[in-house]
Amino acid sequence: MVLWTRLRVDPLAPGPFAEADLQIAVDVARDAEFEDLVSSALHAAPSSFDHSVHVLADGLDPDGWYWYRFRLGDHTSPVGRTRTTPSDGTTPLRLGFSSCQNWESGSYAAHRHLAAADLDLFIWLGDYIYEYGPGNQGVVDSAGLRVHTTPEVTDLAGYRERYGLYKSDRSLQAHHAARPWIVTWDDHEIDNNHAGLNTEDGQDPAAFLERRRAAHLAWWENMPVRLDPPTGDRFEIHRTIRWGSLAHLHMLDGRQYRDAQPTDGDPVILPVVGDLGVRTLAETARDPNQSMLGTEQREWLENEVVSSDPTWNILGNQVYMHGLDAFPGAAPATNTDTWDGYHGERLELLTNLTSNSDNLVILSGDFHSSTAADVRADPFDLSGPIIATEFMAPAISSSFPELLRGLAPLVVGFNPQVRHFDPDNGFMTCEVTSTTWTTELHRLNDVTAEDSDVAIAARFTVRAGSPGIATVEVSQ
Ligand SMILES: [Fe+2]
């Protein structure tokens, strides 16, 4: 795996803190006291990458925990802990996952609890930062909470500073130090709801490309990813991580290669309630060429799943695939930024993937609420077979809109594929064995409080060989 750090004197100061490239010592050991050293070597911390450090730790055994630290002059970093993957097919996998940590919407108490949890790895599904300026979230319950320190972020200095702000949180730091993270991005690492080079506010594509290059570089600098730094206009981050032959995790990029969200459906506007922010499912969404993944990534994914045979195939994916019809009518009323805007591609993709994998589990985020769901290739044809299972994790801190909070129970009522819904913050953890997948939903009592408790709100199981949610247990 990659060991990551970034050298700063002041985390909020823009740009590298020194002109010079630096050398940093990296110690890796089999124990937290560094008595049983595996390696101790110098690595580059280049000024051009804002003194970020990505060290590929090699010479490690499979299925082992390791401890690491960084040293520069008189300074020694806090100790980080990481682990390697097993090579067999029977070692259980315990993973946590979540997304969406708007600085202005709440504390990172969820990360504090995650840091203490007994998990092998953590999967981040996007919205690590939010690009917005201060106080423009319209978040009703954010009064008195933290605010962004700079205007909307659009350039390299801005993105770097924003990562510095988010990473100044001690709970987030502790969680990074506790275990390996496997990360992808969603929209807010660059700009809200962008799709390829299409933006909500119609930015000039050439200017947006520049902005995206800056955002990609700052993301790479600040994420513990086993990737080379971006060089061109595109940055390929989709990849597969293998937990022996028990589980293959396919991390997807649902933003960079996307076609624009469809606009040919009718907006759904209700009396009293107003605009639901959804559109009826129309021709563009039904067109299989309307793509979220892009041809190359989609072919790569299908090939990954077809060419190997793990017990479980996991998609690390941003937006829900299980479909959601927000209002009963002649056509489903859908959020076009989710897979519902890419309905035709989803139909083909899920059909192809599940013809080769009995146990496809989709992990999602983005929606600032959580679900456990049965997945059909066409979510709106309930006569079709359940072919996969989806868990959508709650947001670490980002808020679910108050209006939707009130409507959610009704909406869930006419979406029987959604077996459980919860609008609160927290995270999910999963225990994966060769026979059973168990997911626990951890819900924060009060996202605004750093010392908030967390409780298990629900538990779900999936049985290998039988797609869909097998059991739902809701805590009282
Ligand atoms: Fe988000």
Image: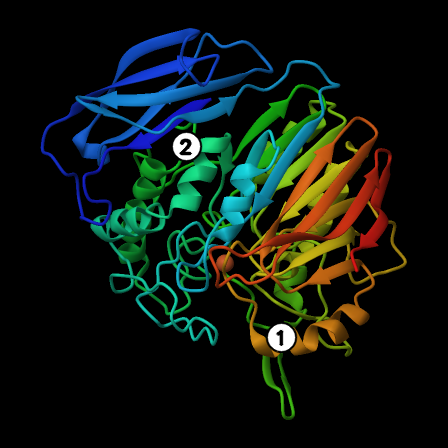
Counting from the top left corner in percent of width and height, residue 15 is at: 17, 44
Question: Does the beta carbon of the residue at mark 2 sit less than 8 Å from ligand 1?
Answer: no
User: Between residues 13 and 271, which one lies in front from this camera angle?
Assistant: 13
- Check whether the beta carbons of the residues at disc 1 and disc 2 lie within 8 A of each other: no
Q: Is residue 46 left or right of residue 337?
A: left
Colour treatment of the image: rainbow
Give me the residue at 87% from left, 54% from top. 384
Vertical relation: 235 (above or below) 260:
above
In this view of the protein, can residue 352 be seen by the observer? no
Of the numbered discs 1 and 2, the one sitting upstream in the chain is 2
Q: Secondary structure at mark 1?
A: helix
User: Between residues 120 and 53, which one lies in front from this camera angle?
Assistant: 120
Question: Does the beta carbon of the residue at mark 1 sit less than 8 Å from ligand 1?
Answer: no
View extreme (bottom): residue: 272
- Can you tell which quarter of the image residue 368 is in? bottom right
- Can you tell which quarter of the image residue 76 is in? top left
Counting from the top left corner in percent of width and height, residue 200 is at: 42, 67
Counting from the top left corner in percent of width and height, residue 283 is at: 65, 66
View extreme (left): residue: 19
Q: Which residue is mark 1?
A: 404
Q: Is residue 28 left or right of residue 267?
A: left
Q: Is residue 475 left or right of residue 111?
A: right
- What distance separates the C-alpha of mark 1 from that of mark 2? 35 Å
Q: Which residue is mark 2?
A: 224
User: Between residues 151 and 39, which one lies in front from this camera angle?
Assistant: 39
Q: Secondary structure at mark 2?
A: loop
Give me the residue at 31% from left, 62% from top. 148
